[in-house]
Image (cartoon, rainbow, N blue to C red):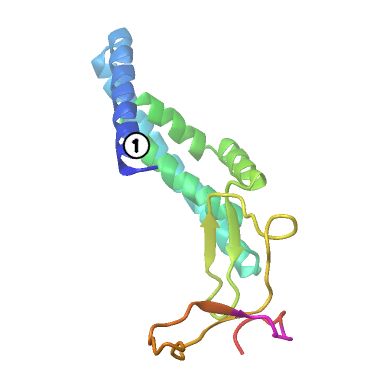
Amino acid sequence: MGFGRVFLTILIFALVEVMVLAAVADVIGWPVTIVAVVTTALIGSVLFRRQGLDTWVRLNERMNRGEMPGRELVEGMMLLLGGAFLITPGFITDALGFVLLLPFTRRALAERLIRRGAVQAFASRGGNGGVFFYQSTRWRGGPGGGNVYDGDASVDREPANDGDQRRRPLTLDENEEDSGRDGPR
């Protein structure tokens, strides 16, 4: 999605939000509308703080047990997005923010995203402290989904036959016998 589409989406969303605010203000009045928007922002900040702390504690517990806290990381992203929606003035953003902040809806959404494969987590192997990588599409590798090669990657730094000093592309060493090791030698 290019910058133009993102900008157009945000602009249209902001215009719809203003139209909804004006329609609600016509029914209940501007002072009540402003109080309602400020109140939802305050309630949302309290809810965000409590839910964020709960998610942080669960994330730390899973990491201390040596498990990957994939669900907690997805929920943490949802909490951040929900908090941002709730501090943005408007009723549509408030509704979206509460959906992302309430525990039962957030956990159901996170579970659905993980189950569908819309978000996948992979723990890296080696001595880098267990960095996590998230992708937004389904992994296509593995049985029936592409080729998986077992081996080590290396860079051939010797010059090519024509005297070219540029680096050659990465190659795969397919002769490795110790393919199941956990990190560098």
Is 70 or 12 nearer to us in this picture?
12
Name the side, left or right, on which 162 lies relative to 123. Answer: left
Magenta segment range?
172-178
Establish if 69 lies above or below 16: below
At 67% across and 71% down in the image, what residue appears?
A: 149
| Percent position of residue 158, x then y | 46, 91
Establish if 88 lies above or below 154: above
Q: Which residue is mark 1?
A: 5
Magenta includes 177? yes
Residue 61 in view: no
| Percent position of residue 2, x then y | 35, 43
At 44% across and 40% down in the image, what residue appears?
A: 82
Magenta includes 99? no
Name the quadrant of the C terminus.
bottom right
Q: What predominant SS class does the magenta segment belong to?
A: loop
Name the quadrant of the N terminus.
top left
Name the side, left or right, on which 50 lies relative to 6. Answer: right
Examine the image and state in which quarter residue 103 appears.
Answer: top right
